[in-house]
Image (cartoon, helix red, strand yellow):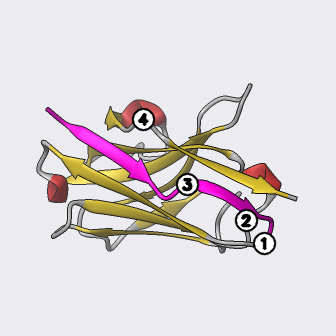
Amino acid sequence: QVQLVESGGGLVQAGGSLTLSCAASGLTFSSYAMGWFRQAPGKEREFVAAIRRTGDTTYYADSVKGRSTVSRDNAKNTVYLQLNSLKPEDTAAYYCAAASDTSSYLLRSQAYYFWGRGTQVTVSS
């Protein structure tokens, strides 16, 4: 049974930083590309960042580019998302997900097979 468990969310002031973690089990983690998505109340789920299985290729949404870093530790079956210079508009539930590493559509939620249950990030102004 595949499980993706996010952690590290919380309440932070604008301008602050958080590092989210996603621990995977039940799959060969090093074979999958991993993505981060977020969903704010009343809005659609949107892409945040993704990383290929070897960690050598990453992708970012324009909204977080330059102030976020996605990374992974295949030995720990964990993917991370560091968010800096947080803004109130970053407030959302953040989800990690696993996709085929050969996918050309890592920016789309439809590419992902497995999803975590999310961790809440709230940024106060």
Choose the circle earlier in sequence order: 4 or 2. Answer: 2
Residue at far right of view: 125
Q: Whole-Å distance between the Cαs marked 4 and 1?
A: 26 Å
Instruction: Check residue 4 for magenta coloring.
Output: yes
Task: Write the residue at 18% across / 54% down.
Answer: 29
Q: Whole-Å distance between the Cαs marked 3 and 4?
A: 12 Å
Do labels 3 and 2 touch, CB within 8 Å? no
Q: Magenta residues?
A: 1-15
Q: Whole-Å distance between the Cαs marked 2 and 1?
A: 5 Å
> In this rendering, does residue 101 appear at all?
no
Which three-letter amino acid code belongs to the residue tagged 1? Gly
Quarter of the figure with residue 98: top left
> In this rendering, does residue 24 appear at all?
yes
> Which residue lies under the disc numbered 1?
15
In this view, the mark in front (3 or 2)? 3
> Which residue lies under the disc numbered 3?
9
> Which residue lies under the disc numbered 2?
86
State the image coordinates of residue 87 (x, y, percent, origin top left): 79, 60
Choose the circle earlier in sequence order: 3 or 1. Answer: 3
Q: Secondary structure at mark 3?
A: loop
> Which residue lies under the disc numbered 4?
117
